[in-house]
Amino acid sequence: MNTVVHSLNNSLNLARLNNIRKCASTAKSIRQPRRWTKVSIGALAILGAGGTAYYYSIENQERRKMKVLVGGVGRFLRSLYIGMSLSIDYKWTLYGLVGDEYDKAAKPVHTRAAQRILEGCLKNGGLYIKLGQGLVSFNHMLPKEYIDVLVVLQDKALPRKSDEVRQLFLEDFKMLPEEMFQSFESEAISAASIAQVHKAVTHEGQEVAVKVQYIDLQDRFHGDIKTVDILLYLIGLMHEKFDFSWVLKDLAHTLESELDFENEGRNGEKCARDLKHLDYLYVPTIHWNKTSKRVLTAEWIDGIKISDLDGIKKMGLSIKDINHKLCKCFADQIFHSGFVHADPHPGNVYVRKSEQSGKAELVLLDHGLYDYLKPNQRKSLCQLYKAIVLKDEANMVKYSNELGVKEWYLFSCCLVQRMVYVPSRPYKFNFFDFSALKKLSVIGKKALMEEVMTLHDELNDIARSMPTAMHWIFRNLNTIRAISRIHGHPVDRHYIMGKSAIDGLYKDENRTSFLDKIKSIWSRWVFDYKLQRESFQLWAQRRLLRVLIYFGFVPNFEKLESKYEQQMVERMA
């Protein structure tokens, strides 16, 4: 009996001992994570304190680069989210829809997409604002809903800190703007997507315009370009029709050049040299000792925008004279030097009265965006324009191919900004015949839509294949045409362009023999005759149309025609 009791006591003691061990083990396992948690928190605290100490120990410029790096991750994730949400929205909403049902459902999707892009551009800022503005210029390709939403970016400037300009001057010149100039207006007189302009007076008493770049744009440029490139690539994989990554590749180098204000100053001086034969054109003088890659100081210009019709009339200047000079100077850039101002919008072309002649003088501003046609490309372009005027199809094909474009007919229409009449390319449909359009059957309308989409694809193929500089030339031509429209089309731009093209073609030729000179004179005379005949025919057609409208034989659709013409030209350009 005692042995049994003793065994039971031993078993009980052993069980108690095991319970104690288990409790101790459990307590240890509980204490272990807590210890590691404390170690982790301590390590993070040390790293945070060390990082903070390092951040405040470095120069302001290095701090900004760190912010750009961290912010770049946020901009990438935000852009990725927007790109994926756009893709999913389009796929989900429009899947399986066709015809009118598709068109009706697509409009709100376009609006939502544009609003998301707008929000992303505004939050990301910098280069994204510039790219958003570029989208607005694609009004010939993007749906109307995109343009209506994104148009606010055209006049959008980034909010900047008040001490940013002072910091930039310290980095670039080792002095404050108040020290560099006799007086410097701290409040900008104008602002755009990459810079703002301040008015100042030098110590010599000269009034100047000081263009100051936003301080972080160059730091974040390459990262932002890479982000957008990745997004366009991913979207292109999901939507083959939206493969526009090639546009960004062409645009990246140009945008980088635009951020170099020293390059802008050199562009302006080259423009002045190339057009020195035009005594009515002026380019502001650059103050190189007050200029850097992020600051451009130029002569102050008092004038009015070329689109200010009331101001031009008050100055007593001729709209027709101004329009002729505008077309002439940019035509000579294209056909004589090939060095082309790619952004001649009304804010970059000023008008003032010449003190010598009392007539209009044009002042070209903002020379950051230029591109250059190689000499052989410029000559091929001159030859193509000549072939278009002479209706020489063989040479139209030849010189289009020399410029890398196989679809010679559409390319020729784009260049002259009007339909080119050649026997081999009659019109398939008269878009002005609205009664015929209404009578088309469902199948006919579908066929017409397929033809329009084919045209759209062909234009995209042309844009891909032609030299990069031609993109900017078409933008130049489209902008000049828009200004001419504001002026009421007082001159024949096609005639001015043609004359400049033939002059550019023959200016480099060294004709020494008497026979060669006679051939050259005859060739130019024939060209000029056909160009004038074409201009007269167009003038006569317009006058006849006005007579028919006046007597009520045809409806008054001049406004509609103008709007339609604008849309067609924008699609081509």
Image (tube, grey):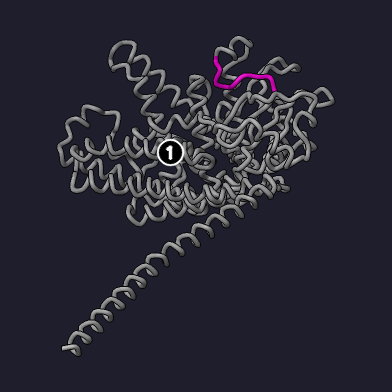
Per the image, label 1 sits on a secondary structure element best described as: loop
Q: Quadrant of residue 178?
A: top right
Q: Which residues are magenta?
A: 301-309
- Image location (x, y in percent) of residue 107: 27, 35
Query: Does the magenta portion include 52?
Result: no
x%, y% of residue 126? 54, 40
Q: Main secondary structure of the magenta part?
A: loop
User: In this rendering, is residue 285 above or below 390?
Assistant: above
Residue sitting at x 80%, y 30%: 179
Please identify the quadrant where the C terminus is shown: top left
Q: Nearer the viewer, residue 174 or 327?
A: 174
Look at label 1 and name its amino acid: Phe
Q: Quadrant of residue 476?
A: top right
Please tell me which residue lies in front, 149 or 37. Answer: 37
- Residue found 61% across the figure and 43% down from its top: 216
Let me know if residue 483 appears in the view: yes
Q: Which residue is mark 1?
A: 138
Q: Nearer the viewer, residue 195 or 476?
A: 195
Rendered location of residue 80, percent (x, y): 40, 50
Give the vertical position of 212 relative to 562 (above or below). below
Dot 1 alpha-carbon crowd within 10 angstroms: few under 14, some 14 to 19, many 20 or more: some
